[in-house]
Image (spheres, rainbow, N blue to C red):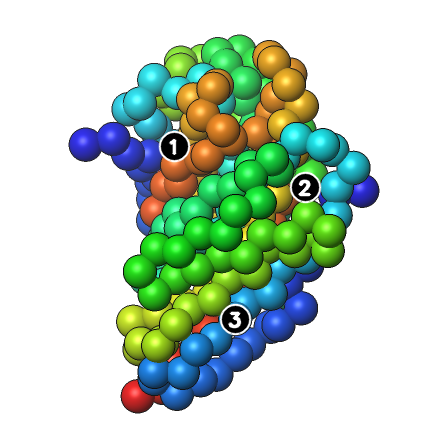
Amino acid sequence: EAQVTQNPRYLITVTGKKLTVTCSQNMNHEYMSWYRQDPGLGLRQIYYSMNVEVTDKGDVPEGYKVSRKEKRNFPLILESPSPNQTSLYFCASRRESSYNEQFFGPGTRLTVL
Amino acid sequence: AQKVTQAQTEISVVEKEDVTLDCVYETRDTTYYLFWYKQPPSGELVFLIRRNSFDEQNEISGRYSWNFQKSTSSFNFTITASQVVDSAVYFCALSPFEGGSSNTGKLIFGQGTTLQVKP
């Protein structure tokens, strides 16, 4: 089954404790990205990757890191989480020539205390 | 600047009523895509429709219909004879097409409209 998976789905952590949210897709998609969803703001792009070893900042990259060592994986790293990073996070992927239609993962709800 | 505005934060209707969710977008690009996504209470994002900027034909899919008007930069979504299962947050999104290998495919989302359908 074609899908984007994220782990964990739910995470409660404390300020300053490094964490990684994994994202994996099995569709051989070139493009992957991370979004965060906040009430009243919709979804905003954090980082994206056009292909392996090619990443770039989205609209709200502060406090986040990403890497793209393999085509299928695109982890989101929070080196020192803060309460303002409490949010619902979505990973997405798409083929390069796909009319920009993206497949979304199930979401990761992160709470930083 | 590229922007999507969903002015209706929350809408509440009674089952079987028709409801229209508004979406207004801003872009200077001539080629772009518009999307609608549904987010049910379970939280996942469900793709509903994609439209490209060169196709202004309205579309109907069962109880759902979409009205794309470039003249007013709007892409409104109508649910006919609403049902309780339609209760969700609905997002409109814009994706500019930069062309070729530089196309990032970024989605610019509106704020979302929460639709509550009461029995």
Q: Point out the tag, 1 or 2, that comes first from the N-terminus.
A: 1
Which secondary structure, mark 2?
A: loop
Place of residue B78 in the rendered image (x, y in percent of width and height, measured from the top left) = 47, 66
Are the residues flagged by discs 1 and 2 from a single subunit? yes
- Disc 1 from disc 2: Cα separation: 18 Å
Residue A2 vertical position relative to residue A41 in the rendered view, above or below: above
Q: Are the residues tagged 1 and 2 within 8 Å (C-beta)?
A: no
For image coordinates 34% across by 47% down, the residue present is A106
Q: Are the residues tagged 3 and 2 within 8 Å (C-beta)?
A: no
Judge depth for marks 3 and 2 and give the one in front: 3
Q: Chain of mark 3?
A: B
Are the residues flagged by discs 3 and 2 from a single subunit? no
Q: Residues within 10 Å of mark 3 (few under 14, many from 20)?
A: some
Q: Residues within 10 Å of mark 2 (few under 14, many from 20)?
A: few
For image coordinates 54% across by 22% down, the residue present is A49
Examine the image and state in which quarter residue A28 appears: top left
Q: Quadrant of the N terminus of chain A?
A: top left
Residue A57 in view, yes or no: yes
Which secondary structure, mark 3?
A: strand
Q: Is residue B114 left or right of residue B16?
A: right
Residue pointed to by mark 3: B20
Q: Which mark is residue A69?
A: none
Identify residue type, mark 2. Answer: Val
Place of residue A4 in the rendered image (x, y in percent of width and height, measured from the top left) = 33, 34
Residue A79 vertical position relative to residue A9 in the rendered view, above or below: above
- Disc 3 from disc 1: Cα separation: 35 Å
Q: Nearer the viewer, residue A27 or A22?
A: A27
Q: Which mark is residue A23?
A: 1
Are the residues flagged by discs 3 and 1 from a single subunit? no
Identify residue type, mark 1. Answer: Cys
Q: Residues within 10 Å of mark 1 (few under 14, many from 20)?
A: many
Residue pointed to by mark 2: A60
